[in-house]
Amino acid sequence: MPFRPRRLLLLGITLLMLQSGVPAHAAERVAVLTSAQGGAYAETVSALREGLRSSAPAAELTAHNWEDASVAELAQSDIVVTVGTQAAQVLSQLEVAVPVLHVLLPQAAYEKLPRRRTGDPATSAIFLDQPPERQITLLRLALPDWPRLALLSGPNSHELVARLGEIARDRGLQVQIAAVEDDRQLYPALQRVLAEPSVLLATPDTVVSNSYTVQNVLLTAYRQRSPVIGFSAAYVRAGALLGLYSTPAQIGSQAAQIVARTLRGEHLPAPAHPTGFEVAINPTVARSLGIWLRSGAELAVELRRREGARP
């Protein structure tokens, strides 16, 4: 069958591009900057890579530890994704004029990053922490007979704790809040907010919740016969009654959807909390406190239903 003139023209253009070394279709470049190797960071990158295979198959993803990043290579990318707080802080100091998506960092850490210059491409984020409305809804679902909520407000969580308290009061809960500016104030603050048995809702504030304070918080709450809602699976394993969290894989998959849309020419969305999440429970702690709980899977399904999300 003879070539038509249009097909001959297209064939000629393609041959010229191949002869000149210019690819007929340049792949979109996605640069990933991680705070560390392995663990949650590697799991996030793996989910991002897997998600892009189906949503943006032409995209080429390269991952770098923050110490090995090349400013020139980052600047030649179509979008940069940072994974973890340290990577976000490092990138914010670099002059890289491409869209940036930060993931796996708390909202408080994101809000402390330097603002980009006027005219620079957009920046967005998927926060590590859960939206306050979701946390209070879980509390009412899982523990409907507990009328009191205890909150500790650290240097990095004043606004979050205030919002949690506001939503909780609107839902009919009695709220006790104590400020903790350093670890010496932690135990007295716990004694105040747990003077009566209450649900202690942990927040990802590095002063209130860190590797040195978690066990003291859990033991003090347990002695006061007060259940703790944590923000990670590790918190639940350590002794929290239940936990609400998003896995690195869920955040990586959500990031892949955003990156794919950005590569297609859409604007980055506003910074937001993760859409996917899990609920875990600690049956041993539940039995010790005499609390009956539905399974974590059942609570998660009901929570998604109330948010209008797919199970």
Image (cartoon, helix red, strand yellow):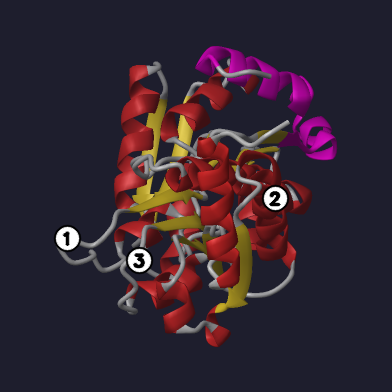
Q: Residue at x 48, y 60 (%)?
A: 208
Q: Nearer the viewer, residue 234 or 199?
A: 234
Q: Nearer the viewer, residue 82 or 76?
A: 76
Please give the range of residues in magenta. Answer: 280-308
The Cα atoms of the two marked residues, 1 and 2, are separated by: 31 Å
Residue 203 located left or right of residue 279: left
Instruction: Identify the amino acid type marked 1.
Output: Gly
Q: Position of residue 129 (x, y in %)?
A: 50, 46
Q: Which residue is mark 3?
A: 181
**Residue 47's disc number:** 2
Q: Residue at x 57, y 25 (%)?
A: 138
For discs 3 and 1, the disc positioned in front in the rendered view: 1
Q: Residue at x 52, y 50 (%)?
A: 128
Question: Would residue 105 be visible to someone looking at this image?
Answer: no
Q: Position of residue 179 (x, y in %)?
A: 34, 55
Q: How many neighbours does mark 2 have within 10 angstroms: few (below 14), some (14-19), or many (20 or more)?
A: many
Q: Secondary structure at mark 3?
A: loop
Q: Which residue is mark 1?
A: 119
Instruction: Identify the amino acid type marked 3.
Output: Glu
Q: Position of residue 261 (x, y in %)?
A: 47, 40
Residue 46 located left or right of residue 210: right
Q: Are marks 3 and 2 in contact (CB under 8 Å)?
A: no
Is residue 160 shown above or below 35? Answer: above
> Nearer the N terminus, badge 3 or badge 2?
2
Instruction: Check the picture and name the quadrant holding the N terminus.
Output: top right
> Nearer the N terminus, badge 3 or badge 1?
1
Whether residue 278 is in magenta: the answer is: no
